Amino acid sequence: MTLSALPIENLVAALAPLLGPQGIITEAAGIERYTVDFWHQHKGTTPLVLRPDSTEAVAAIVREAARLGVAIVPQSGNSGLVAGGIPDGSGRQVVLSLERLNRIRAVDAAGGSLVAEAGCILADVQAAADGAGRLFPLSLGAEGSCRIGGNLSTNAGGVNVLRYGMTRQLVLGLEVVLADGRVWNGLRALQKDNTGYDLKQLFIGAEGSLGIITAAVLRLYPRPRERRTIWLGIESPADALRLLSLFQDHLGELISSFELIAGLGVEAANDHLPGGRRPLAEPHPWHLLIEVAWSLDGGLDVPVDRALEAGFDAGLVQDGTIAQNEAQRTAMWLIREGQSEATTKVGHVQRSDISVAIADLPALIARAEAHFGKLAPDVQLFPFGHVGDGNLHFNFLIPRDREGVPELRSLLNEHLMMLVAEFGGSFSAEHGIGRLKRGELERRKDPLELELMRRLKATLDPTGILNPGVILAAPDAPASREIS
Ligand SMILES: Cc1cc2nc3c(=O)[nH]c(=O)nc-3n(C[C@H](O)[C@H](O)[C@H](O)COP(=O)(O)OP(=O)(O)OC[C@H]3O[C@@H](n4cnc5c(N)ncnc54)[C@H](O)[C@@H]3O)c2cc1C
């Protein structure tokens, strides 16, 4: 693609002195990775990637883009799963990568806060907090590549939501470049601030459609000193819920993760994931990965043993093991995080991200098994996810040699959304809307809520240059191309 459209040529000319050669990519080979999503399922197109390394440079880009009417797609780690961080297929959207804006500006252990720029990799923020004797609890499978700007913009969930909440609960302040290029400095570390509307919450979860997050004050927690990571083989999702209740009776708020994984996913990881080994000797229909932790030095064994004993006595646990060291803990999490990728070695994977009331999870899974057993008997279900939050990645394994895979994907998705709606659930629990779920949003969101969302967008981005086509429809915005 060439810089044929005049406004983009002008944009490059205006920004080149400010951004320097490292800050501008125009060759196709360099641009490629910014236009394809994590699973290589969607591809957009752009003539230009801009890589500023300061808030001032981001502001200058947005000012210039606003002046020339060029649409901007902010991108941090590009691990998002709804095609919101890649450009559409028009070739008229410019990618603004935050990856060079990656300094940790301050760590305040006593005050429990850390200031990170949008391009900081999540794992680096976790390490900085740890280095100061604190915990930044956001944790997800993509933490080695996703970045704080993306985490905030998707209001990411992950494996510790049960105890620490979603990303929006981990943020004290924000710095945001607005659609006209002005910088809103809301970088306050105040735990309490009831001075009108909580503006930062508008930008969190907005997927780059209302402003560009350049830095954030993040909330830190006491670092756990003692932790137990437990793997259980169980018979059914109903037993998983009974165990959740039982663990809560014995361990209360000390439970940080309570993850359910279908046997199919565990076996795929066991067979196909490099270094992946099932923690239990035998296969089981379902597995639980549970983590509990506290900030005291010892004493966790007693309540953990009691919870496990109660689980075995009630006949809810078929087999179980506790990680004895960090290597075993890592091996357990490797299976949890890697099973989704491992299943791609077995067939085509259709992914989803739904939630229902926690109590409804077993009924939803049973209903889905019966429904899809009839609709597509050759397709296997392997739900997994954050059962403690009522959030499942309800995934399907489609035989490798199946014909009509794209049509089948749509059918599976449509029927799953129908079932989830029957249970009053959400069609996007933690991944957001992006470009992929925009139709779903339009179909399923309350019209008044949609109207309020459109009015917010029109107020904060009146010329529509910020991530057009993401969350809400934009005039003339072709979707990114499906490439699998
Ligand atoms: C293996 C794997 C596991 C995952 N597990 C989870 C999980 O457990 N829970 C979960 O919630 N998600 C999960 N995800 C999804 C993804 O990692 C998260 O959505 C993550 O928060 C995205 O961060 P990112 O930096 O990659 O964002 P990107 O993909 O770069 O962007 C995501 C969205 O935010 C916008 N954006 C990015 N940066 C900015 C900015 N600075 N200002 C304004 N808008 C911006 C983009 O335009 C886009 O709309 C997983 C993904 C993978 C690949």
Image (tube, rainbow, N blue to C red):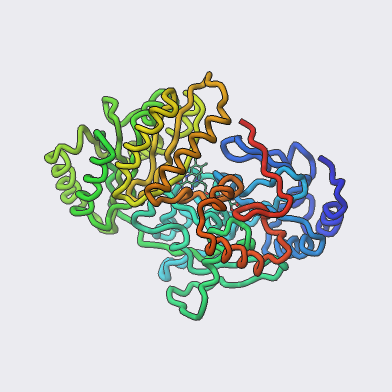
Q: Quadrant of the N terminus?
A: top right
Q: Quadrant of the C terminus?
A: top right
Residue sticking out furthest to the top: 401
Is 445 or 304 nearer to us in this picture?
445
* Whole-percent x, y for residue 89 in the image: 72, 42
- Residue 337, quarter of picture: top left
* Whole-percent x, y for residue 37 in the image: 61, 40
Is 268 or 323 nearer to us in this picture?
268
Residue at 34% over, 46% down = 387
Residue sticking out furthest to the bottom: 195
One can see residue 91 in this view? yes
Residue at 63% over, 49% down = 85
Residue at 52% over, 21% down = 402
One can see residue 99 in this view? no
* Whole-percent x, y for residue 392 in the image: 40, 43
Is 17 or 152 nearer to us in this picture?
152
- Residue 316, quarter of picture: top left
Residue at 66% over, 70% down = 183
The number of numbered badges drawn on the structure is: 0
Left-right relation of 24 to 285: right
111 w.r.t. 374: above or below = below
* Whole-percent x, y for residue 40 in the image: 60, 35
